[in-house]
DNA sequence: GTGTTTTTGTGACCCAAATCACAACTGATG
DNA sequence: CATCAGTTGTGATTTGGGTCACAAAAACAC
């Protein structure tokens, strides 16, 4: 469980046993069942989550109760309603488990404490944040430039494993296409 | 010129005169004319730019030479092809001036040197990066959930000043809508 | 295993927005 | 101020993808 977290950090920064022990003081762990909400629209967001195993979706429900998928997150990904997390406010999104999911999570205080106590961690967070920003820009471009078919192909290419794990209905909500259109792409 | 940069930093972190002097050692300044490219698709990207005055667009040209606007940037905004900047690689985007523009710019070494020499600056970069990530997520959601009319209204609401400064053609390329459709929204 | 819910495919129909085409308007530039 | 490029509006036509509807197939529950 914690091993996975450590390996994840060490992809970017090296940590001594002592340093990792310090890091761990800021984390708790928890398990969720398939279908559980980790948080819902309106909840105060106190934590950011590291997915140890499983799969979740970050969704937004519009005024007509249509569900739009902001992102998926699986093993080794971080997820939260980061806007709410950093501003200590309420979620506009909901985070729901598509599979049974185990997470390590920490508070904003923990996040800041780690940055202060261990400059490496500041570098780690910055890299993660930059990475998230750049992949969002790619997705914006994909939404601006491609039709459903190309978009679906890009998705499969970028996340090969998710093609099998996630239902077409969910993928359609992520790509911004109707279920039916996605289904007709094969032909 | 540098005053504007200092004020910008001090919106997030306080800097002594000495600290700011250190910060400035990493920056150079430059002016561009309307229509100039600050960089183009394929150029190696060495710098990140702080816009002191003026207005630029970050664009992507697809295989059919259609132009898509990834973002606008005006006074007090940072811009670059950040993916290329952080990976010391070549631009996939181009950055073009829509108005005469003055910038302060720095290298990745400068960026890292500032983070190391002045932990405050690490915090500053992190905040900026998080901010960029969160606004990208908002834009993704806007592309997923709204029709052209709503999207245009959101745009005007989020960036009131840009409504006047930028031609409709450019705004259409940003919103992912044809010029004609945008023009017909009034009716 | 039987019943229930969720997922997927496909047909029929419709509409929002793309595309093509042209004319009027605005402004730069020499 | 005359020219030429870019901008905006608006009509006519086409089309990609949404919506509605139903049935087959999986997945799940008890």
Image (spheres, coloured by chain):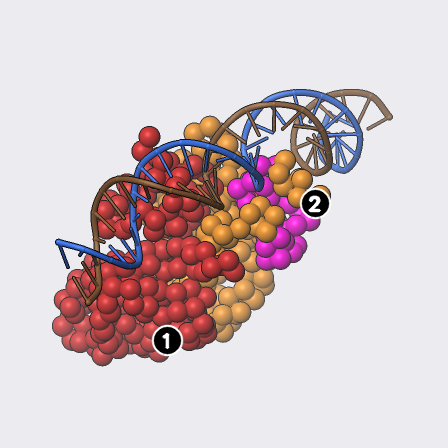
Chain colours: A red, B orange, C blue, D brown
Q: Specify whether disc 2 shares its chain with disc 1.
A: no
Judged from the image, the secondary structure of the residue bearing numbered disc 1 is loop
Residue A166 picture location, percent across and down = 27, 51
For the point 37% across and 75% down, the residue is: A46
Helix, strand or loop for the magenta stretch, by majority: helix
Look at the numbered disc 2 and give the secondary structure of its residue. loop
| Residue to which mark 1 is pinned | A46
Q: Tell me if mark 2 has few (under 14), some (14-19) or many (20+) residues whose alpha carbon lies within 10 angstroms of its own.
A: few
Report crowding for label 1: few under 14, some 14 to 19, many 20 or more residues within 10 A (C-alpha). Answer: many
Q: Is residue A33 above or below residue B60?
A: below
- Relative to A64, say whether A105 is above or below: below
Relative to A149, is A79 above or below? below
Displayed quadrant of residue A54: bottom left
- Residue A131 at what x, y percent from top left? 34, 54
| Residue on which the image places disc 2 | B186
User: What chain does mark 2 sit on?
Assistant: B
Q: Identify whether A17 is placed above or below A14.
A: below
Q: Nearer the viewer, residue A138 or A75?
A: A75
Q: Which residues are magenta?
A: B152-179
The answer to which of B155 and B108 lies nearer the viewer is B155
């Amino acid at each position: 469980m914690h091993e996975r977290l450590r390996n994840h950090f060490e992809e970017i920064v090296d940590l001594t046993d002592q340093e990792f022990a310090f890091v761990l003081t800021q984390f708790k762990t928890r398990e969720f069942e398939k279908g559980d909400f980790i948080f819902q629209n309106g909840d105060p967001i106190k934590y950011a989550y590291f997915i140890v195993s499983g799969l979740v979706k970050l969704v937004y429900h519009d005024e007509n109760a249509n569900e739009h998928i902001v992102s998926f997150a699986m093993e080794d990904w971080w997820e939260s309603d980061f806007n709410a997390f950093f501003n200590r406010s309420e979620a506009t999104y909901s985070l729901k488990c598509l599979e049974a999911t185990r997470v390590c999570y920490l508070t904003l205080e923990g996040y800041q404490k780690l940055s202060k106590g261990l400059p490496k961690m500041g570098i780690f967070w910055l890299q993660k944040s930059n990475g998230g920003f750049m992949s969002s820009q790619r997705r914006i471009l994909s939404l601006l430039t491609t039709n459903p078919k190309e978009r679906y192909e890009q998705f499969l290419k970028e996340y090969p494993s998710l093609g099998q794990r996630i239902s077409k209905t969910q993928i359609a909500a992520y790509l911004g296409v109707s279920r039916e259109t996605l289904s007709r792409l094969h032909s």
